[in-house]
Amino acid sequence: MRGRIVLTGMLLMGSAFPSAGSIAYAIESSDTGNFQEGSSYYFINYNGGEQEIVLSENVKLILTGWTDESKLSVNGRIEIENDSSSQIQDITLAVNDELNEIAVSENESIPYRLAMSDSFKVDEVKPLNLNEHITVVAENENGTSIEEVQAVDEYGTVIQNKGLTYYSIDENNKKIEITEEEYNSLNSDVDPSTEVIATNDNPIVSENSFNLVKEDYSLKSVQTTATSSPVENPSVVYSTHVQDYGWLAGVSDGQMSGTEGQAKRLEAIKISLDKAPYSGGISYTTHVQDYGWLNNVSDGALSGTSGESKRLEAIQINLTGEMAQHYDIYYRVHAQDYGWLDWAKNGQSAGTQGLSRRLEAIEIVLVAKDGAAPGSTNKPLIMDPSVVYSTHVQDYGWLTGVSDGQMSGTQGQAKRLEAIKISLDKAPYSGGISYKTHVQGYGWLNNVSNGALSGTSGESKRLEAIQINLTGEMAQHFDIYYRVHAQDYGWLDWAKNGESAGTQGLSKRLEAIQIILVEKGGAAPGPTTKPFIESNITNYYSLTLNDALNMQMKVSPQTDKYRNDPAYVSSQYMNVFNGGSITGSGVNLRTSPNIADNVAVYVGKGTLFKVLDANVTGDMVSGSTRWYQIEYNGNILYVHSSLANANLRIGQATTDYLNIRAEKNSGSHIYATVMKDAQLIVLEEDNSGWYKVSIGNWRNATSSDVLYYLDPNNFINDVQQKFQFMDLKKPSGVSKETLNQYLAGKGILANQGQAFIEAGFKYGINEVYLMAHTLLETGQGTSTLAKGVEYNGRTVYNMYGVGALDSCPVECGAKTAYEKGWFTPYDAIVGGAAFIDNGYLGGNNNYNVVQNTLYEMRWNPQVMSTFNRAGHQYATDIGWAYKQVQVMYDVYKIQPYTIYLEFPVYK
């Protein structure tokens, strides 16, 4: 019974398949110099059985068995079937490491490599990387030598033989290239009885070295004395067992065994020496998933596992006996996520340890004792990184360094930490570690990094808190956790990646610390709820919460909570007529239906009017001569039909104060109140005695709505909403990169992180708050004023809505920006921050009250407590402070920063 494999890929080199008269035959030469980049070939792992490979609908390759016991070639046949005939041709296929071809016609051929294996498998592979492999074919005492160059792919297949190159040594002892004739001339005096001839029967390089010596030439090799026998160059031969592929064909002397770019693990390896000129051999051990380091094996034995799907993670290789005295063994590995590591030597570990990374490929080479390494030897092994730290302790000085979660400091001795040094050891990625401490009398110090001292020396100052961050690539792959033992509190919970650990404002010393690295996203080493305790400021006010509520209700607090709910007015107090509204952004109402010097008044979008005649003919505008005759403020005027909508029902209030209610009854909640003659759009008219009207999104809030946002106890313990009470005069220290990360895609504000930092520094305002405030004011950087408005021939920007009024949002905001000189986004961010500083954080207002938290900016409890009324409040929206904190909390999650809280307490 024979196996059968159907291949969907077509690897014929020609443009058409052979005709009925074609005869197939095998080519056993590896001269495949015309193999095109991006082409594929068949990699056949063969176990000696009869196998059928279907190459296309009408072409089959049948493998029938080994030609002899040497297993250096395979018998087979090609079967080609056409509509009218079929062709069968016996062929012999070479078993080696070279790219061979089966010719189907004079113009068409099938490239393949056939390797001996313990199981049968066929893959269509496409070389992605070609490496140049150089073999010294001959080396003579007079300094001349011959080298053969081959292009080898990641599967160890020789794609192309590039030929021989001849060398000599010049007077400066440098190797120079010479011609074949010059080489022969320099070696013409070699005694024929002592010269070594490289032929197909007597090769200088072993069979395992890809049959590098071809039968179409012979070479003179190492010149020796008449009394000595020739010494052949030894070769190291190796094969790996690869996930999904099984055992790959053996390679040698620095060639790659394994794969690149396929995420396939090495599972086992066999290594041996060939033509060793001295006694001894080769021994090796592998570090295997779940097992660790295995026992040493030697001389072709298997190291690793079979049938267990366990990855190799590292390897050590040694020469033994006399071979170790005359040669060094170098080897390097291709490791998951790291690529090719540097070269290891003579038993050193190559690969990774403690990182659960698979080996994917290996190269091994012999070098004459103390000869030059084949490449860099700096980093052949990547180990699980370690964080190392030492603390300076009261009365003891610097303690011995500890690592990876061990305690540095003391417990139960009341000894303060005064300084700390932290560094990384065996870091597998670029980057490092930075940290800063909060010190008695100084506050937060500047960041230091990689073993530098943070704290004080000789000043007897206690450390009170610490922040630690990883940098560079290390921060992308690991989290840094740390916890501290604080005076009176003991061990606090674990902080992470820049969060504060310790206390602040409590004058408590740190007494010990533990620090540990965890793979990115891995489980924390313990609880993380409370790593930091700070003394928050509490402001007590001489009024009750109910008193504050009553004061707030008198100033018509607004909410958009009911924006989608209907609103009603009593029909008894409204006169309804046909009307319309202005649809243009700004429109001139005229005294006649023509374009002339007849402008009566300029009105904005949404302005309502009464329609007197919807079909007046006048000057043509936008392709139409239709105008509307309207009544506006008691005057008969005209507006072009392209600038207005004349299909509305308009209601006009007939009473001094008309209440707009939530329901069709006079006892329901009042959304708003309008004065006599005010006009509203009427949406529905019926016989209920109430009209449904349109009043927009913002409406009067109910007392229960206001109480929810006014009561600080609803938010003090909320991880996000507690930012309402953050002191906005304290900087966060967040980096420009973090701010820019958050600002990505935020319109005109993108990449303006530095502007917010500089504005915060200039005016003493928290930079994260400034950014949050701006994003809310500008609609995430997309508002008209934010994007720039033309005013007096200049483009001006306004990021905080300074000077913008509800009745004049753009024009007035642009006028203010022009007067302030805000001609760039940067100018508007930095300059506009002064308005927030002066009026609120700076206390420069009629009440001389500092409002340095979002809660105080919105509700101003100090004014209520002192003056018995609500006043100087930043917004009428009851949810303004609640909405502001989202941005500040989101930034905190990207880069944790210290927050200082001020809690209001009502009587």
Image: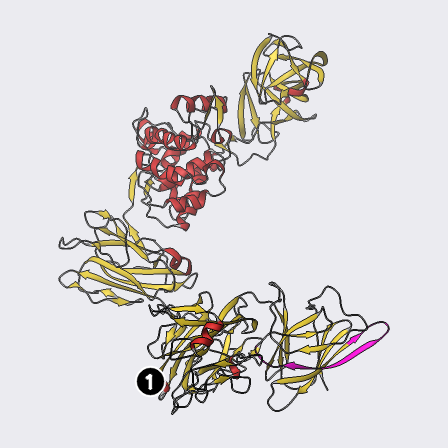
In the rendered image, which quarter is residue 50 located in?
bottom right
Q: Magenta span has 83?
A: yes
| Residue 480 in view | yes
Which quadrant of the view contains residue 691?
A: top right
Location of residue 728 by image quarter: top left
Identify the residue shown where x is 49% and y is 40%: 746
**Residue 629 in picture, x, y percent from top left:** 67, 12
Query: Magenta stretch: residue 519 in it?
Result: no
Q: What amino acid type should be assigned to the residue bearing mark 1?
A: Gln
666 sits left or right of 827 in the view: right
> Which part of the image, by quadrant, shows the C terminus?
top left
Colour pattern? secondary structure
Predominant SS along the magenta part: strand
- Name the secondary structure under disc 1: helix
Residue 335 placed where, x, y %? 45, 69
Residue 231 point in image, percent of width and height: 41, 86
Residue stretch rendered in magenta on the structure: 80-97
Pointer 1: residues within 10 angstroms few (<14), some, or many (20+)? some
> What percent of the width, then of the height, locates residue 241?
53, 79
Q: Nearer the viewer, residue 343 or 213?
A: 213
Horizontally, is 646 left or right of 475 in the view?
right
Q: Nearer the viewer, residue 297 or 324?
A: 324
Q: Quadrant of the N terminus?
A: bottom right
Compared to residue 392, the image places residue 283 above or below, namely below
Q: Residue at x 59, y 89 (%)?
A: 70
Position of residue 429 relative to residue 703, above or below, is: below
Q: Is residue 502 visible?
A: no
Using the image, determine if residue 114 lies above or below residue 782.
Answer: below
Q: How many numbered callouts?
A: 1
Give the residue at mark 1: 325
In the displayed image of the protein, which residue is found farthest to the right?
84
